[in-house]
């Protein structure tokens, strides 16, 4: 039986070409064809790295039509690399349909990892990174953007957004209107490039800073936003104490704290401390 081809999903740099890995370059040299979002743009990258491989265009507007042809080619044993204009394909970039189809067809899909603006921003943001969500681009118009932000207002995980420079002020204004001015937010702009900027402020301070400096309204931008603090308000502690009090009548502190954690969704350790206090 003929060996099937492999689909390599290859990340490209988001600015600094030195970030490109030798493995990524070798992969693009070795495959039969490189499927790229914009062949002119990627042609320059391939030329810079002396990669002679043929490019074919696969973008949002033709991906559906191109998928079968590429699957046929993989079926005939040709290896294919998928790249996007910058960063990791499929992350706010085309490629999902091709990768999904390749998986459904039982073909091997191999990631060749590298730059991703969201992850680079998160790594330098100094906001909680143990749990986070990626929201890509918010809707472009205020009404849609505010609606999405309202849906996200109770999210306790760190949130990441991509935003266009000409919308950054409006976006921050809407965040302030929907979420209030207290939350911390990081603007990560032009990552890995000459004018790289990573700044953390409150939403109020960030809006004032970006509005006052047109340079902050240029280039490529990731926003990393603090989630809703999980802290429990005074009012809520009354209810937590009531639950703990009932449980402590029947159970030892450790068990009462564990059960109360299940009931309230709060951390077991915090409830253990609280229960000790109540007992004392
Ligand atoms: N696939 C890419 C990735 O892995 O990050 C993202 C592609 S998306 C079409 C382009 C958006 O990513 C930009 O509008 C910007 O929000 C973000 N971005 C890309 N490069 C960036 C950079 N060097 N610095 C900051 N943000 C960047």
Image (cartoon, rainbow, N blue to C red):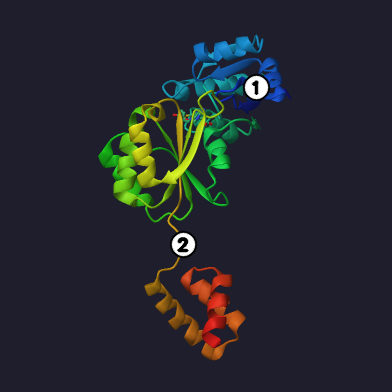
The label number, if any, that marks residue 68 in the structure image: none
Q: Nearer the viewer, residue 105 or 198?
A: 198
Which type of secondary structure does the marked residue at label 1 adopt?
helix
Q: Position of residue 205 (x, y in %)?
A: 38, 44
Q: Nearer the viewer, residue 115 or 189?
A: 189
The label number, if any, that marks residue 230 in the structure image: 2
Taking 32 as reference, is 169 above or below it? below
Quadrant where the N terminus lies?
Answer: top right
Give the left or right position of residue 234, taking residue 117 as reference.
left
Residue at position x 44%, y 20% in the image: 62
Which type of secondary structure does the marked residue at label 2 adopt?
loop
Q: Position of residue 223 (x, y in %)?
A: 45, 39
Residue at position x 55%, y 26% in the image: 14
The label number, if any, that marks residue 18 in the structure image: 1
Quadrant where the C terminus lies?
Answer: bottom right
Q: CA distance from mark 1 to mark 2?
A: 40 Å
Residue at position x 38%, y 52% in the image: 182
Residue at position x 69%, y 15% in the image: 29
Q: Position of residue 247 (x, y in %)?
A: 51, 85
Q: Mark 2 or mark 1, which is nearer the start of the sequence? A: 1
């Amino acid at each position: 039986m003929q060996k099937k081809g492999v689909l390599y999903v290859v990340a490209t740099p988001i600015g600094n070409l030195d970030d490109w890995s030798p493995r990524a370059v070798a992969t693009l040299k070795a495959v039969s064809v490189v499927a790229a979002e914009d062949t002119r743009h990627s042609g320059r990258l391939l030329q810079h790295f002396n990669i002679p491989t043929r490019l074919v265009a696969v973008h949002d507007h033709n991906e559906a039509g191109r998928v079968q042809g590429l699957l046929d080619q993989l079926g005939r044993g040709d290896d294919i690399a998928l790249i996007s204009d910058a960063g990791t394909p499929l992350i706010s970039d085309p490629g999902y349909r091709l990768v999904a189809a390749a998986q459904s067809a039982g073909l091997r899909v191999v990631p060749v990892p590298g730059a991703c603006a969201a992850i680079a921003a998160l790594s330098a943001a100094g906001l909680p990174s143990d749990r986070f969500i990626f929201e890509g681009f918010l809707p472009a118009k205020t009404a849609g953007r505010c609606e999405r932000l309202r849906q996200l207002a109770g999210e306790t995980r760190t949130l990441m957004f991509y935003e266009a420079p000409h919308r950054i002020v409006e976006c921050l204004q809407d965040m302030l209107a929907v979420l209030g001015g207290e939350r911390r937010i990081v603007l990560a702009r032009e990552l890995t490039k000459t004018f790289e900027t990573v700044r953390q402020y409150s939403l109020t301070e960030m809006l004032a800073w970006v509005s006052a400096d047109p340079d902050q309204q240029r280039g490529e931008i990731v926003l990393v936003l603090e989630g809703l603090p999980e802290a429990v308000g005074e009012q809520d502690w009354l209810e937590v104490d009531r639950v703990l009090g009932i449980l402590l009548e029947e159970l030892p502190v450790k068990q009462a704290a564990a059960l109360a954690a299940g009931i309230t969704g709060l951390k077991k350790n915090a409830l253990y401390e609280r229960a000790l206090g109540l007992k004392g």
